[in-house]
């Protein structure tokens, strides 16, 4: 439950930003992935965690993009969903999940920067 509360806090506290994600957002996303792994280790099931996250996505879509955190669009949802699924489908140590997420988030942001107009 604490993870879901933390996720809701991050949703409304994040500063407005367009994709790609900032380094700070990637770090916060890494914290979210770390918390997902801690929840897994604490006994939370994949189905429960992902269902709650999907409910959060529905809620997040009701906010203006300026008030959202990390999941600004469907591509962001897909990225975060896949990362959370990996936490449950391929269990690794908590900090290894976080570190892997950080690498993939930064790489994704760099790729988006290079393909965006003016990037």
Image (spheres, grey):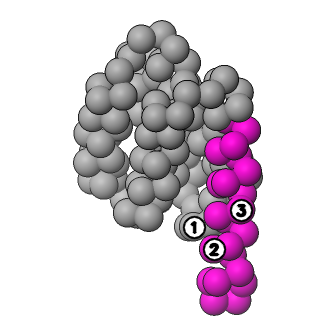
- Residue 3 located within the stretch drawn in magenta: no
Helix, strand, or loop for circle 3?
Answer: helix
Q: Name the mark on residue 107.
A: 3
Question: Looking at the image, which is closer to me, 83 or 60?
Answer: 83
Bounds of the magenta span? 98-119
Q: Residue furthest bottom?
A: 117
Residue 98 drawn at (x, y percent): 67, 35
Q: Can you tell which mark lies on residue 19?
A: 1
Residue 85 in view of the camera = yes
Q: Residue at x 44, y 64 (%)?
A: 75
- For residue 107: magenta? yes
**In terms of secondary structure, where does tag 1 sit?**
loop
Q: At 64% across and 83% down in the image, what residue appears? A: 115
Sort mark 1 into few (<14), some (14-19) or many (20+) by Cα contacts within 10 Å.
some
Determine which residue is flagged by label 2: 112
Instruction: Please identify, in this view, whether the residue under mark 1 or under mark 2 is nearer the observer.
Output: 2
| Precedes in sequence: disc 2 or disc 3 | 3
CB under 8 Å between discs 1 and 3: no
The answer to whether 35 appears left or right of 54 in the picture is right
Tell me what residue is drawn at x 68 percent, y 73 percent: 111
Q: Position of residue 55 (x, y in %)?
A: 26, 39
Q: Residues within 10 Å of mark 2 (few under 14, many from 20)?
A: some
Whether residues under marks 1 and 2 lie with C-beta atoms below 8 angstroms apart, the answer is yes
Residue toward you, 34 or 47: 47
Residue 71 appearing in the image: no
* Image coords of residue 21 (percent x, y): 63, 59
Q: How many marks?
A: 3
Residue 105 circle label: none
In the image: residue 29, left or right of residue 52: right
Give the foreground label among 1 and 3. 3
| Residue furthest out toward the top | 42
- For residue 100, what is the image quadrant? top right
């Amino acid at each position: 439950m604490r993870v879901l509360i933390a996720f809701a806090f991050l949703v409304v506290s994040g500063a407005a930003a367009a994709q790609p994600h900032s380094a700070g957002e990637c770090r916060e996303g890494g914290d979210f992935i770390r918390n997902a792994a801690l929840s897994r280790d604490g006994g939370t099931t994949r189905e429960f965690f992902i269902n709650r996250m999907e409910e959060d996505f529905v809620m997040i879509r009701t906010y203006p993009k300026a008030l959202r955190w990390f999941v600004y669009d469907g591509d962001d949802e897909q990225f975060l969903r896949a990362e959370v699924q990996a936490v449950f489908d391929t269990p690794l140590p908590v900090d290894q999940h976080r570190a892997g997420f950080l690498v993939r988030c930064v790489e994704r942001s760099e790729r988006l920067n290079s393909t965006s107009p003016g990037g």
